[in-house]
Image (cartoon, rainbow, N blue to C red):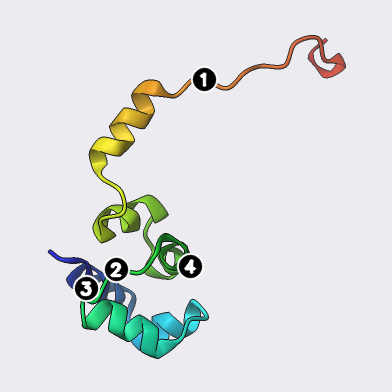
Amino acid sequence: MDFAEYLKARCAERGISLHRLALLCDLNQIYFYQAVSKNRSTPPPWVLRRAAPHLGRPYVEVLIAAGHLRPEDLEEYRRHRRPPRRSVGRADDR
């Protein structure tokens, strides 16, 4: 499934049109239509971040569907991620 099909399917699930999605994201409708329907390019990540909540999908899933991120990238990140540091010696910890 290409990104345009993915996006149209998610909009159909939510009962909104691509035009309505563009309005909800505060985007230029012509730009959004061309990026999605004409397959000129996938929208940049900042556009997808705005769209994800209106699509009812996690931002990472939308990035993967658009081709900005691969599932392998997430696995690599998880393998190399360090656990968060705990602060030591705070008065709250006593």
Residue 83, given in percent of the width and then of the height, sits at 51, 20
The residue under the point 33% across, 58% down is 62
The residue under the point 22% across, 67% down is 3
Pointer 4 residue: 50
Q: Is residue 36 left or right of residue 24?
A: left
**Label 2 amino acid?**
Thr
Pointer 2 residue: 42
Q: Quadrant of the N terminus?
A: bottom left
- Quick one: SS at disc 3? helix
Judge depth for marks 2 and 1 and give the one in front: 2
Q: CA distance from mark 2 to mark 1?
A: 33 Å
**Label 4 amino acid?**
Arg
Pointer 3 residue: 4
Residue 80, given in percent of the width and then of the height, sits at 39, 22
- Relative to 67, residue 20 above or below: below
Residue 39, given in percent of the width and then of the height, sits at 21, 76
Q: Earlier in the sequence, mark 4 or mark 2?
A: 2
Mark 2, Cα crowd under 10 Å, few <14 / some 14-19 / many 20+, is: many
Q: Earlier in the sequence, mark 2 or mark 1?
A: 2
Pointer 1 residue: 83
Mark 1, Cα crowd under 10 Å, few <14 / some 14-19 / many 20+, is: few
**Label 1 amino acid?**
Pro
The front one of 52 and 64 is 64
Judge depth for marks 4 and 2 and give the one in front: 2
Q: Earlier in the sequence, mark 4 or mark 1?
A: 4
The residue under the point 15% across, 66% down is 2
